[in-house]
Amino acid sequence: MYRVAAVCTGNICRSPIAEFMLAEAVEEAGLSDHVSVESFAVSAYEEGNPMDRRARSWLVDNEVGEREDIDAHISRPITAQALEGLSLALALDVEHLAELRALAEGFPDDPANNPTIRLIGSFNPELETASPEEQGIYDPWYGGPEDFDKVSEMIRACVPGVIEFIRHELAARAVLDVE
């Protein structure tokens, strides 16, 4: 199974939105038998808490994901063990990228078996040449519903690139024929 995870600060806003958008895209791409999607936090501060109500409202209002799954989401921090089990870790901003890379420093020098760690924004074709800071998805937590709309648009722009990357990864592993 190719395991993908979106990672943000508290796993209550950005990463759950990314998780549900990516899971929907994986299903639409016919990759559900080969790919799983989840999300984590780099901080344990929100551990065990539900998704932010504004993120939940955005997902429900935009019919992204199943309501039961959205309601069942709880924040959980990423651990070295969880990171090691991933195929692709998607950091939502540069701080998360640094945290994930630091967590992976102790992994054996085995690129074929270590997770790929990237900024989700690097999959947005309009940001390919942008700096890592510009590729980051800002935290809507301090804002209002319009910030959740904007962040969701930013994440959605990355999803096709992530799906294409996963397709190529699966093809390289001889799991999937690339058409």
Image (cartoon, grey):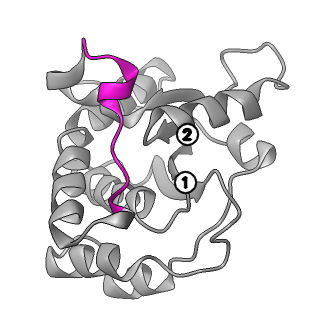
Find the magenta span and give its range: 129-140
| Secondary structure of the residue carrying numbered label 1 | loop
Decide: is 122 above or below 155: above
Q: Which residue is mark 2?
A: 96
Q: x and y percent of residue 172 in the render?
A: 46, 18
Residue at 44% in and 56% down: 15
| Quadrant housing the C terminus | top left
Q: Name the residue at 32% across, 35% down.
A: 162
Is disc 2 surrounded by few (<14), some (14 to 19) or many (20+) residues within 10 Å?
many
> As shown in the figure, which amino acid type bears the numbered disc 2?
His
**N-terminal-most mark, 1 or 2:** 1
Left/right of residue 49 with respect to residue 22 in the rendered view: right
Please say if 166 is above or below 155: above
Q: Nearer the viewer, residue 103 or 173?
A: 103
Write down the residue under mark 1.
9
Amino acid type for the residue under numbered disc 1: Thr
Callout 1 touching callout 2 (CB < 8 Å): yes
Reply above or below: 170 against 70. above
If the image is split into quadrants, where does the N terminus sit?
top right
Whether residue 29 can be seen here: no
Helix, strand or loop at disc 2? helix
Rendered image quadrant of residue 102: top right
* Res. 92 visible in picture: yes
